[in-house]
């Protein structure tokens, strides 16, 4: 079998899922083209804006397509490319795309509200609080994993011999290091330093781009040309002056940047930086697919005996842990991802001009992400022999580098298909992956900040400080004024959603008066820099003491658990309307059992023993694991209790 055949089979399977299964689900959920969507009904020109489906699709895909569909397959293909590919395809069609479609459709039908608000409507305020805590924990895990991955990418080094280059070349700076494959010291290229400088240049130009694009209203085509120019300049500057600092220094530098970006107006860094960077992302994805197809057409990708095996379940289970549930949570975003429900309920559901758009955006964007994961698998099995893959990703001495593994796989695939130097493909892969990583960190820290603020409002909303803020915010939003800074969840810029009022402006309860130190403390908790600092501090608490390989397992588990809970909320919504719900319930149960099993396994076999042994970072992972488990059990317990009391899931009368 050739790589071209794998791509063809995978593409046909995903297309069949989108053309046959998605319309079937739409009929079961009651999709109606004539029903008015929140975007059309509200159409405030700010948050709720009916938008053409292709534009919303690009926005949503840029939101969900982070580094997950790249890093997950790289780590999990140790179990064999057959199991990895099957999980990506079956998971993408029957779990991930269903999850994204259900989350998008339900949040749209509920007036453009996110899943925590819907949980409060149908389950109660206790479920709202527990889901909020769970979301903060999951976002912190996302940030910690991607922080370490970003620092790894920006400081990666590769042996010149692996790039088919010799010492004295002028493209990369050199450093004498042991080759992870041979253990022999030889010159290494500082390949991550080029992406490092590219990140710095793009970030420096971001405020100017935001001013021109969002403030001066320059036309889109002109801004895109400028963005392409900035991207080209950033790479050229990186080639000339690559940055070489330690991973710890990069972690602290990135943390400082996201702290600043999360507290600044959204157009200043986040929207504008992502608008520039998305041009590298889209070009990189197209380049990757073209290289694979070219390699297949040239006949150079037939699988050899040295390639990554079809099935390597026993060795993978011995090194990483039991294939179930391990592989199913390591490959998160490429098959199913709870993070997507945050994007669906954040901006996507507020932009849909008609109900069928929820299917075309929610279901098909996930299929495209699954196809990206398929392309990554194909690059790995076409570009790297199994021994080389293990030497990079799982060396005997430890300290593997999944980022470099992906870059080298792409480099050799590009060399086979297009005849370009291995170094060119590897550099392109590094730039692509780093763009995904920083974009996700930008988004996740800002989202964490808003979740923390929403939590303070929930706990202290009865006091006058928060009550007055809620009344002011509600009045401003109701009057169509500027309101608080919007949240930007995509890499495309332009489509935004503002944070909810700090507490319900509709409440008629007399607020409790505060004074002195307590009043000052409440005002302190309202400061955006305080909550941004909390988000960054929690990220560093997990990210400094643990590498991505450690954090990825609990991140994947919590992320898949959020997907199960999102499907669970969707199931309750369908039950309340007496519609069929098996297509949401079955994957919810599977992901719930898988994720909970994984979290318990991590707790018993790694975190508790590591904490008792005094290993660095284990206490934070132990707390995160217990927190996610307890919040999930609590949400399910409240749901069952409410069901037994009422035998129905009708909306609960309360302000939303």
Image (spheres, rainbow, N blue to C red):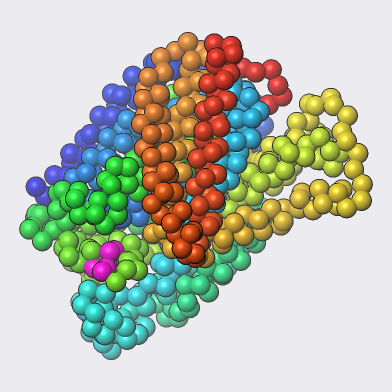
Q: Residue furthest front?
A: 612
**x 9%, y 54%: residue:** 302
- Residue found 32% across the figure and 46% down from its top: 326
User: Which residues make up the magenta segment?
Assistant: 391-396
213 left or right, relative to 63: right
For residue 220, above or below residue 424: above
Residue 277 image position (x, y, % from top left):
47, 58
The correct choice, above or below, for 62 with respect to 410 in the image is above
Is residue 392 in the magenta section?
Answer: yes
Residue extending farthest to the bottom is 168
Quick check: 391 left or right of 508? Answer: left
Q: Nearer the viewer, residue 115 or 136?
A: 136
Work out whether 132 lies above or below 171. above
Give the residue at x 35% y 49%: 330
Which quadrant would residue 260 be assigned to in this image? bottom right
Q: Does the magenta portion include 249? A: no
């Amino acid at each position: 079998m050739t790589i071209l055949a794998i791509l063809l089979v995978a593409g046909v399977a995903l297309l069949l899922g989108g053309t046959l299964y998605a319309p079937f689900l739409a009929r079961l959920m009651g999709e109606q083209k004539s029903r008015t969507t929140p975007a059309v009904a509200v159409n405030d020109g700010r948050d709720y804006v009916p938008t053409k489906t292709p534009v919303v699709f690009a926005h949503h895909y840029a939101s969900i397509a982070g580094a997950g569909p790249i890093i997950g397959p790289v780590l999990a293909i140790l179990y064999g490319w057959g199991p990895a590919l099957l999980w990506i395809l079956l998971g993408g069609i029957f779990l991930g795309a269903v999850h994204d479609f259900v989350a998008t459709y339900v949040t749209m039908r509920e007036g453009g509200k996110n899943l925590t608000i819907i949980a409060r409507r149908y389950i109660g305020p206790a479920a709202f609080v527990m889901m909020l805590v769970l979301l903060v924990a999951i976002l912190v895990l996302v940030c910690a994993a991607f922080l370490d991955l970003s620092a790894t990418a920006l400081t990666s080094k590769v042996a010149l011999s692996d790039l088919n280059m010799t010492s004295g070349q002028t493209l990369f700076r050199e450093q004498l290091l042991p080759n992870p494959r041979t253990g022999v010291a030889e010159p290494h290229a500082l390949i991550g330093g080029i992406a490092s400088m590219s990140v710095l240049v793009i970030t420096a130009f971001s405020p100017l781009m935001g001013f021109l694009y969002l403030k001066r209203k320059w036309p889109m085509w002109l801004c895109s040309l400028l963005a392409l120019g900035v991207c080209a300049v950033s790479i050229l500057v990186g080639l000339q002056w690559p940055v070489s600092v330690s991973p710890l220094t990069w972690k602290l530098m990135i943390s400082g940047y996201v702290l600043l970006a999360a507290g600044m107006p959204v157009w200043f860094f986040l929207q504008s930086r992502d608008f520039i960077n998305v041009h590298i992302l889209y070009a990189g994805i197209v380049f990757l697919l073209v290289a694979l197809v070219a390699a297949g057409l040239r006949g150079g990708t037939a699988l050899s005996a040295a390639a990554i095996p079809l099935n390597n379940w026993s060795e993978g289970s011995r090194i990483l842990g039991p294939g179930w549930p391990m592989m199913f949570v390591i490959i998160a975003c490429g098959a199913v991802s709870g993070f997507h429900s945050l994007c669906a309920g954040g901006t996507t559901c507020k932009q849909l001009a008609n109900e069928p758009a929820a299917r075309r955006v929610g279901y098909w964007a996930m299929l495209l992400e699954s196809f990206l994961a398929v392309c990554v698998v194909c690059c790995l099995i076409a570009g790297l022999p199994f021994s080389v893959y293990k030497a990079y990703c799982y060396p005997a001495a430890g300290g593997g580098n999944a980022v470099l593994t992906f870059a080298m796989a792409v480099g050799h695939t590009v060399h086979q298909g297009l005849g370009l130097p291995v170094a060119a493909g590897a550099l392109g892969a590094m730039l692509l992956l780093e763009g995904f990583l920083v974009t996700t960190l930008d988004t996740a820290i800002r989202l964490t900040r808003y979740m923390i603020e929403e939590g303070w409002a929930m706990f202290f909303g009865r006091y006058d400080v928060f009550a007055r803020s809620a009344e002011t915010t509600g009045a401003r939003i109701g009057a169509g004024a500027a309101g608080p800074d919007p949240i930007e969840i995509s890499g495309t810029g332009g489509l935004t959603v503002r944070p909810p009022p700090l507490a319900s402006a509709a409440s008629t309860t007399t607020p409790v008066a505060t004074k002195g130190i307590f009043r000052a403390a409440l005002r302190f908790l309202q400061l955006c820099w305080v909550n941004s600092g909390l988000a960054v501090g929690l990220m560093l608490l997990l990210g400094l003491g643990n590498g991505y390989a450690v954090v990825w397992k609990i991140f994947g588990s919590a992320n898949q658990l959020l997907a199960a809970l999102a499907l669970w909320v969707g199931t309750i919504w369908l039950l309340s309307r007496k519609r069929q719900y098996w297509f949401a319930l079955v994957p919810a149960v599977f992901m719930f059992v898988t994720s909970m099993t994984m979290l318990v396994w991590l707790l018993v076999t790694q975190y508790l023993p590591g904490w008792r042994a005094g290993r660095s970072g284990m206490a934070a992972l132990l707390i995160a694991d217990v927190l996610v488990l307890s919040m999930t059990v609590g949400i399910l317990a409240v749901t069952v209790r409410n069901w037994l009391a009422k035998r129905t899931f009708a909306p609960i009368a309360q302000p939303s």
